[in-house]
Amino acid sequence: MATESTVTAPPTAVERPRPPGSGLSIGLARAGWYISLTLLAVVVLFPIYMLVIRAISDPISFINAGQPLHIVSAQWDVFSRAWSDAGLARAMGVSAVATIVIMGAQFMTSVLGAYAFAFLEFPLKKLLFAIVIGTLLLPIEVTLVANIQTVRSLGWLNSVQGLTFPFLATALGIFLIRQGFLGLPRDLRDAATLDGFGHIGFLFKVAIPLAKPVIGSFLVISFLSAWNQYVWPRNATTEGAWQTVQIALRTLTTTRVDQINLAFAGAIIAALPLVLLLIFFQRQMVRGLTAGAVKG
Amino acid sequence: MSGVTFDEVTKRFGDTTAVENMSLEVADGEFMVLLGPSGCGKSTALRMIAGLEEVSDGMLSIGNRVVNNIPPRERDIAMVFQSYALYPHMSVRKNIESPLVANRANRLPAGERSERIDEAAEVLGLTDYLDRKPGELSGGQRQRVALARAIVRRPEVFLMDEPLSNLDAKLRTQTRLELVELHRRLRTTFVYVTHDQVEAMTMADRIAIINDGHVQQVGRPQEVYDRPANLFVARFIGSPPMNTISGTVGTSGTGGNVATEAGVVAVAELSGSRAGDEVVLGVRPEYLKPRDPSKDDPGAGGLRARVENIEMLGHERHLLTRVGNEVMVARLDPALPPPSIGDEVVLEADAANVYLFDPSTTERLGSGTSTPTATVVADG
Amino acid sequence: MSITVESSPDGATKRTGQRVREALLGWAFLLPAMAIFVTFFYYPLYRLIDMSLHRENRFGTAAPYVGPSQLVDTLSGSDFLEGVKHSGLYMVYTVPLGILLGILLAVAANRRLKGIRVFQTIFSSTVATSVAVASVIFFTLVNPEVGYFKDVSWLSLSNPDTALFSVSLSSVWQNLGLTFIIVLASLQAIPTEVEEAAALDGYGPVRHFLRITVPLISPALMFLAVVLVVAALQAYAQIEVLTNGGPGTSTQTLLFKIADPQGIRPLGIRASMSIGLFALTAIVAAGQYALLSKRVHYGD
């Protein structure tokens, strides 16, 4: 029997066997392949490389040196200056709080909503489901103007509530987790009923533990979208103190040219949480990003 | 302890009726097997006992209690599922403990719980595996965990839904014996659903054969084999199944005969049918033999047949023949020289072991009265 | 005689009680999500319509009801149409190029080679950038004052004819990681038997790719197309960081005009434009639905 719920397994990097050919041509083909891969890697990495050397180089010296491909007049303290003097520490804190609130709330609203749609019978179920689906047509970009008015009239501009409230529930989470719940074998649900689990017990003791892979993938997506938000926090904050890190980055790009490497260092700092996520949760990240795109 | 009673129970899913007016009594302590092809309603019947399906009509009782509206966890039953339905994220111990703790309202004290778990694990030989996860166990071990989870709650009734069908053939034979042993030890009512007649024949006190949402016959294994109530039971029980061919009754001397398109078959007992009646004649493979060609007697009757295939099974041979439009199987002694494929043979039926069925109702003629003397048990 | 269960008074109440409890639980579980959806998804739609029906005076002190005239004027006005044009161009620049590069990277990295994991990680790396971070990264490349490529004419942010394209490259680059991951995953989901059967059938590499691989990964490509189209409609941070809408209005997409960081458009007009964006979103969604319900690959 399945030891995990029937969630789409993450694609593993299994390479297929190639038909054999002569040794020499294989060697040449392989060398050609490595050269192509390396060229592509250079194209992908070049912008990041530029960011790093530009962050560390003194901006004016770098331009005067004719924009070389290496560091000029290194300023290693640029990261600490960006962190403290340029206010990134506070911005990272605001981002962290907003992200944690959004993730926690989305976990709760999605799991409960998914459970209701997967396992409970109640009047108006179809209508309520349609309401959930309908939100996909109303992304924050469309409703931005009106929502800012709402948040303003609630007095929530420049507040954690203002930054987070429109995102405390999401149709995507309800869908994904509902799919995970529906994938639980019927026998298992029946066995739980006979064991005497009520709905709450079944939800916490059986359904959530078994849907962990889907929930994990969803939380990764939730983290990414919350941390990376731009349009909403840009409009929901008017004071520098409530800027999230993404907004603070833009503010830094508007500083004087001789300070511009603070923005570049800030971008590196702002990306660090995602780099860590990519390193430690690669599986969940790939599964989350490919959810809905790939079968099997 | 208590039995289970279906009193004209019906289960409808929308427009389809899965179980119709079913009446069946499972006695206290009995091992009852519900046997039938897939989709016949046997699993629905079992799930109604469990409370996983609501009863649409009629009355369902466990012991003296009508349980139509009693939620599953208050029915004092335990169920073993085909897929075992173990919780993959819990250890074996937690799995077995689950029914004792899931319902907060009647949770047992911890001491008694662990006593019961240890006892169930002991009975099923799981003591060494209590801290493993189901994923680390073999199929047979998982099956025993499912059984342990059932016996730990000491229910009035055990329900089992095809619990052996995920095991390999060897393990299945062994587990059959263990289940019979378990039943003997617990002396509790078992209701066991399967489509496998061998499981039914080897384990059941009584078998209820179900088709199309209706109980076709209830009886001890030997009884349903020897005295099938109708054509469905006759063809469903026994492997290979009973041969049937339609014909017309004629009389001769004390017994009678049935004239078919392929020849005339002598019948010892006409079971109330009269000359000229249309009947379906049935004979089990073990009572059908090709006549020795050297002793050929053109006047003696028999069914003209052509050999299409011969299946060697080691301890016996099955002769597959075509008789008119029907395929008929005869069971041969492997010691005798077999005919060759393509041979024309004459099949003789043992007159004392021929069944007659009413072609319109499919009921066996003389059901309940006639007692053919067959004693062969279906092979395992 | 058969007993109808529903008529048994004890049973009827017991079962009704259970149903009521289940219904209450279902509604309770959905209440938090529904509160958010109504307040921040549906109520604002009503508000947008309401705002579009009121025209603010020059000082923003009063907004009398004017009927649909403002909505009609806005949606047929040059400002809105320019926004639609720029958003459409942004799609044209980013979607096909993004998918092609994703396929290129994925096919290159879908090989049994030593160290391929390193390349796969490099190609996925841009998923670790937010739009804002990617925009700052491209700032180092194309900014007219300090950018590495500031003198490359076809990447110039100072030229109204090239600025939008130059900005769009930051999106293409930022989306590489996602497109690569999705195409690679779909390539690896192709059953080995299918590959082997095709090899036995004697397809050459190019025909194999076009006849076997592309049809089999078409659902993933479809999905990507939808994701990239939506991303293009929602492009904003890149523009604000790299050009702030300029030079002139040459990089003002529809969303940029709606968000209106310089505060030059009255609320009623921005609301009207939002309704236009909603219509475009709905068209994209309808197209997505139509394409997804069409057969884009054989079987499952």
Image: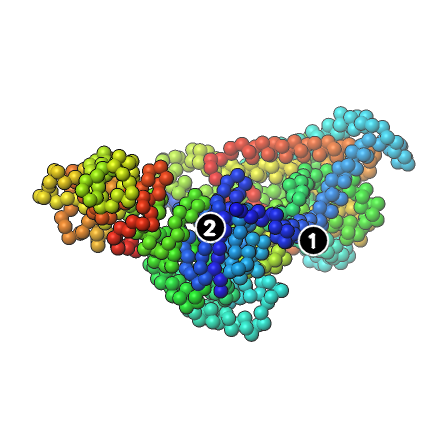
**Element at label 2:** strand
Q: Residues within 10 Å of mark 1 (few under 14, many from 20)?
A: many
Decide if residue A7 is in sight here.
Answer: no
Q: Quadrant of residue C198?
A: top left
**Residue that label 2 marks:** B23
Q: Residue at x 86, y 30 (%)?
A: C65
Q: Residue at x 33, y 44 (%)?
A: B364
For the residue pair A14 and B297, the one nearer the viewer reads as B297
Q: Residue at x 64, y 51 (%)?
A: C9
Decide if residue B3 is in sight here.
Answer: yes
Residue A105 numbered tag:
1
For the residue pair B23 and C185, the one nearer the viewer reads as B23
Q: Is residue C279 left or right of residue B21?
A: right
**Element at label 1:** helix
Whole-number angstrom distance, CA of label 1 to CA of label 2: 53 Å
User: Does mark 2 fall on the same chain as mark 1?
Assistant: no
Marks 1/2 in contact by CB < 8 Å: the verdict is no
For the residue pair C57 and B184, the one nearer the viewer reads as B184
Residue B64 numbered tag:
none
For the residue pair C49 and A185, the one nearer the viewer reads as A185
Q: How far across and how far down the image is residue C88, in percent?
A: 66, 31
Q: Residues within 10 Å of mark 2 (few under 14, many from 20)?
A: some
Q: How far across and how far down the image is residue A144, in percent?
A: 75, 40
Q: How far across and how far down the image is residue C265, in percent?
A: 82, 34
Q: How far across and how far down the image is residue B230, in percent?
A: 35, 45
